Amino acid sequence: MISAVVMSEPHAPLELRSFARPELEPGAILLRTLGSEVCGTDGHLWKGQLAGVPYPIIPGHVSVGRISALGPGEAPRDVDGVPLRVGQTVTFLDVYGTCGRCWYCTVGHATTRCPERKVYGVTLSASDGLLGGWAEYIHLKPGVHVIPLPDELDWRAFLSGGCGMPTALHAVTLGEIAFGDTVVVQGAGPVGLCAAVLAQLRGAGRVIVVGGPEARLAAATRFGADTVIDIGSTTPEERIAAVREATAGRGADVTIEATGVPSAVPEGMRLTRDAGRYVIVGQYTDAGETTFNPHLDLNQKHLDIRGCWGSDVGHVYRAVQVMARYGRIFPWTDLITREYGLAEAQAALEDVAAQRVVKALIVPRQT
């Protein structure tokens, strides 16, 4: 039997359950889990803040594993078209079932809005099998996009970024950061920290991270942020004044919101210069409403606001390449605060929700 963590319903204690080894269909893969991240989304799932979740679920939507078995017939291929083989260390796009035929897939070129998409660890039920990463094994269905990790990229290093890296890569790309730009990142969680790193790689002249708590701001400094502003000891007006002082009174060229806090949005609009760009990536769940002045904050500012939802296989693929290439500059695994076994998943979830850690991993610790 295979052990997995199950979230039976919102607010209920996590459970450890046993599952039978799945029968693999042609094109399927059985991964022996090496590790899976604990994401802010997992906390939202536990609080019931995401619609359409088919509880019970096995949490864990960004994971790394070693291929244990392949389904019968021709071996599935990775995103480069190379046949996969038993023993490879791989990650995969957590989105499964994107149709490739609907308007969003074909005309809108926005596969993250495909109505058929399902997400491992989020919108796939534990009643249907090992479809989440907080488990000893993961069943990858036929058609899941698989990306091998290069030899120079340790699996823990990749999970240090977790879903934050491809999500931030999507946001930074939408921000169109130019050489010399001042970039403000709201939020010092995994998405914000990854956005601060990627802004540097895009040529930003100055990177300012606004967030907390202290441990996360310290990580932002270690990973190259020029300035950090603690939201716990400043007011919105003081933060806006600090950014304007650093930019000759203008504000940031590009601001990236990665907080998940609705009130951060109007503040971010005011942190950004006239005719600047504001990318909102952190509002993944419905945390409530906020208000802004459409004349002063948007229209008169000629502000370009871009919403950013999730990531696709291209973002994950590029995240792997970036983390492999720049591991000599950025010590990714320094972001990992603690690893937790399956039986410790509840503690991991609570530590992430309380921001007691920068990055937490679920590691089944198999023998």
Image (spheres, grey):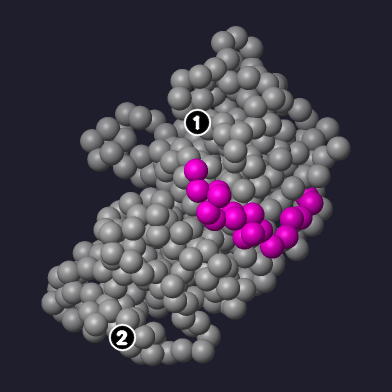
Number of residues whose C-alpha sits closer than 10 Å to that of mark 1, classed few (under 14), some (14–19) or many (20 or more): many
> Going 64% across and 32% down the picture, which residue do you hit?
89
Number of residues whose C-alpha sits closer than 10 Å to that of mark 2, classed few (under 14), some (14–19) or many (20 or more): few
Q: Is residue 182 visible?
A: yes
Residue at disc 2, secondary structure? helix
Residue stretch rendered in magenta on the structure: 325-342
Identity of the amino acid at label 2?
Glu
Front in this rendered view, residue 115 or 27 = 27
Residue 145: mark: 1
Residue at disc 1, secondary structure? loop
> Going 45% across and 25% down the picture, which residue do you hit?
80
Residue 31: % across, % down = 68, 31
Compared to residue 49, the image places residue 54 above or below, namely above
Compared to residue 146, the image places residue 223 above or below, namely below
Q: Quadrant of residue 20?
A: top right
| In the image, residue 42 lies in the stretch drawn in magenta | no
Residue 73 shown left or right of residue 349 in the figure: left
Identity of the amino acid at label 1?
His
Residue 281 shown left or right of residue 145 in the figure: left
Front in this rendered view, residue 219 or 351 = 219
In what quadrant of the picture does the N terminus appear? top right
Q: Which residue is labeled 2 in the image? A: 245
